[in-house]
Amino acid sequence: MEWTVRFTSKAAKQARKLPESVRDNLMLLLKEIMTAGPVRGNWKNYSKLEGRTRRHHCHIKTGKPTYVAVWEESGNEIRVVEIVYAGTHEKAPY
């Protein structure tokens, strides 16, 4: 069963402003989440965020600046993963 992935309106706006190569990496991450679920240990600096059992993050591009994606699982039956942030490491909500 596939996971449904959606952006918050803020994250969608942030994603549109990303450089093309970073946006491509984000889309690859989203495809992996859709097919294999939200736990993505194969991505650089992936982790579940402390204190938030259903929130995850990983680096989608390292260097200067580093770009980070933060996503959150919502609901047990619906299997929705909501992308809550896509942007630089400095402004990441964790």
Image: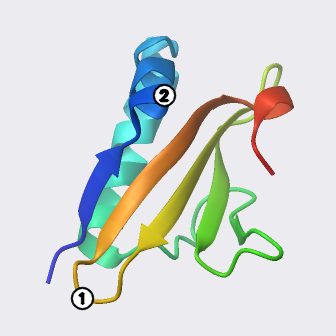
Element on which disc 1 rests? loop
**Other-residue count near label 2 (Cα within 10 Å), few / some / many at <14 / 14–19 / ≥20:** few
On residue 77, the disc is 1
Residue ID at (85%, 29%)? 90
Left or right of 14, for residue 41 = right
**Other-residue count near label 1 (Cα within 10 Å), few / some / many at <14 / 14–19 / ≥20:** few
| Residue projecting furthest to the bottom | 76
Coordinates of residue 33 in the picture (x, y in percent): 36, 64
Coordinates of residue 46 in the picture (x, y in percent): 69, 64
| Residue projecting furthest to the left | 1
Residue ID at (28%, 56%)? 5
Which circle's residue, 2 or 1, is located before the other in the chain?
A: 2
Coordinates of residue 73 in the picture (x, y in percent): 45, 71
Query: Label 2 belongs to which residue?
Result: 10
On residue 27, the disc is none
Which three-letter amino acid code belongs to the residue tagged 1? Answer: Glu
Which three-letter amino acid code belongs to the residue tagged 2? Answer: Lys
Residue ID at (75%, 44%)? 93
Real-space CA distance between mark 2 and mark 1, rounded to the nearest whole angstrom:
25 Å
Whether the residues at callouts 2 and 1 have beta carbons within 8 Å, the answer is no
Nearest the viewer among 91 and 30 is 91
* Residue 2 vertical placement versus 89 (above, below): below
* Residue 64 vertical placement versus 24 (above, below): above
Quarter of the picture containing the N terminus is bottom left
Left or right of 9, for residue 86 = right
Residue ID at (41%, 55%)? 82
Left or right of 90, for residue 44 = left
